[in-house]
Amino acid sequence: MTISNCSNNYGPWQFPEKLIPLITLNALEGKPLPVYGDGRNVRDWLYVEDHCEAIWTIMSRGRRGETYNIGGNSEEENIAVVHGICDILDEIRPRAGAGPRRELITFVTDRPGHDWRYAIDSSKLQSELGWAPRESFRTGLRKTILWYLENSRWVSRVRSGEYLKWIDEHYGPGGR
């Protein structure tokens, strides 16, 4: 048995309440883009496909009883993530008759106990098992945004509660 810990995942299929999909979808709809505090909280971002490959690497080559940290090696301030989303959307889907999406950023009261920095050291995984993330944060972010643009039907279903209804029907109300 091995154990793995990871940093913040992002990518396709992530639920809309998480930072990257929330900002992406709000920006597309011209809604406010809420950023906690001053936005300087730091996160290490890991593209979901890289995470899957790392887990496979650990399962197939990891040493029993060892713990491996899986990170994206891409620490970013939350405000930089939001700026990146705005800039990519302005490039690939400009707002007709409106200014840049960065104008939609709204700073909101920070959550109590909000971690200042959330990152992980994955050097053991890299040195012992030869794994490293393939996706840079910028290319993964672009892929993620394009996925949400191409999968609006899925987004609508999740937002409508259809998904939660399915969970309740198949697993009971306690299934979520």
Image (tube, rainbow, N blue to C red):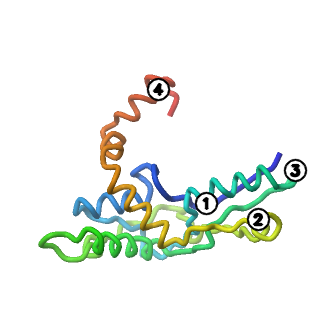
**Kind of residue at disc 1:** Asp
Q: Mark 1 and mark 2: span between their CA atoms?
A: 13 Å
Name the side, left or right, on which 138 lies relative to 119: left
Which residue lies under the disc numbered 1? 50
Q: Are marks 1 and 3 in contact (CB under 8 Å)?
A: no
Relative depth, front residue between 138 and 161: 138
How dense is the environment of label 2, judged by Cα within 10 Å: few (below 14), some, or many (20 and up)? many
Residue annotated with mark 3: 64
Q: Which residue is found at the position 51% from the left and 25% from the top?
A: 171
Q: Secondary structure at mark 1?
A: helix
Q: Which mark is residue 173?
A: 4
Name which residue type carries label 3.
Arg
Q: Is residue 6 left or right of residue 106?
A: right
Q: Which SS class for mark 4?
A: helix
Q: Give whichever of discs 1 and 3 has the lower sequence position.
A: 1
Horizontal relation, residue 103 to residue 88: left or right: left
In terms of secondary structure, where does tag 2 sit? Answer: helix
* Quarter assignment of residue 162: top left
Nearer to us of marks 4 and 3 is 3
Identify the residue under disc 2. Answer: 125
Find the residue positioned furthest to the left. 97
Relative to 71, is 93 on the left or the right?
Answer: left
Name the kind of residue labelled 2 in the image. Answer: Leu
State the CA–CA distance, disc 4 to disc 1.
32 Å
Classify residue 72 by image quadrant. bottom right
Q: Position of residue 20 (x, y in %)?
A: 42, 61
Residue at point 41%, 52% (across, down): 17
